[in-house]
Image (cartoon, rainbow, N blue to C red):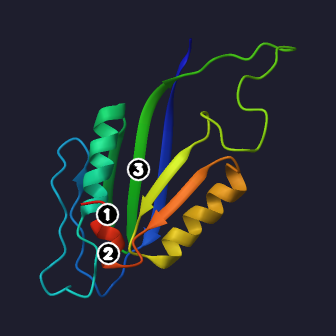
């Protein structure tokens, strides 16, 4: 089967009130921790630790970095492409209900808009996805520690 690269790249604006982030890679999983003065921020870098764990187990490389006022996140995986023969049925779930083929997503983010955006994106582009978001409170973050 032919090989391809599946790449997801998300770009966001950096918060100018926060310190510039260091480059992070899933392969070396050096945790990015907030400065001690950011006690109001419940973000602890735990999300990146979980990303690294899953990425390393599944053959995905992930990277986070900042250029000027933009923060970039990229996940990359080498995949095999299965050619579809004309006239053959497409394999996969045929109904819109949850099945063993549905994508299940657990999102941990301290940003309300990020959680809402993720849920909306999956509803629009992957209606079979089962999405749960966490991070609204410190109690929800504790579930992942």
Nearer the observer, disc 1 or disc 3? 1
Q: Residue at x 28, y 46 (%)?
A: 52
Q: Relative to 81, does residue 52 appear above or below in the rendering?
A: below
Q: CA distance from mark 1 to mark 3?
A: 26 Å
Whole-percent x and y of residue 108?
A: 39, 63
| Pointers 1 and 3 in contact (C-beta within 8 Å) | no
| Pointers 1 and 2 in contact (C-beta within 8 Å) | yes
**Mark found first going from the N terminus, 2 or 3:** 3
Whether residue 5 is visible here, answered yes or no, is yes
Q: Relative to 64, does residue 39 appear above or below in the rendering?
A: below
Whether residue 68 is visible here, answered yes or no, is no
Where residue 122 sits, quadrant-wise, is bottom right
* SS for callout 3: strand
Quarter of the image that includes the N terminus: top right
Quarter of the image that includes the C terminus: bottom left
Q: CA distance from mark 1 to mark 2?
A: 7 Å
Left or right: 112 as drawn, with respect to 143: right
Of 72 and 101, the residue lying toward us: 101
Left or right: 36 as drawn, with respect to 81: left
Whole-percent x and y of residue 25?
A: 25, 49
Write down the residue under mark 3: 74
Q: Residues within 10 Å of mark 3 (few under 14, many from 20)?
A: some
Whole-percent x and y of residue 22?
A: 21, 64
Write down the residue under mark 1: 143
Q: Residue at x 59, y 21 (%)?
A: 81
Q: Point out which mark residue 139 bears.
A: 2
């Amino acid at each position: 089967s032919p090989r391809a690269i599946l790449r997801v790249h998300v770009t966001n604006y950096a918060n100018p009130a926060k310190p510039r982030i260091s480059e992070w890679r899933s392969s070396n999983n050096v945790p990015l921790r907030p400065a001690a003065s950011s006690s109001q921020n419940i973000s602890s870098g735990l999300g990146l630790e979980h990303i690294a764990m899953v990425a390393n187990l599944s053959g995905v490389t992930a990277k986070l970095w900042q250029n000027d006022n933009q923060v970039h996140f990229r996940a990359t995986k080498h995949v095999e492409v299965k050619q579809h023969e004309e006239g053959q049925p497409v394999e996969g779930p045929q109904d819109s209900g949850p099945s063993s083929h549905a994508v299940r997503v657990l999102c941990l983010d301290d940003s309300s808009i990020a959680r809402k955006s993720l849920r909306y994106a999956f509803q629009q582009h992957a209606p079979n996805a089962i999405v749960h978001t966490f991070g609204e409170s410190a109690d929800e973050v504790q579930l992942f520690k």
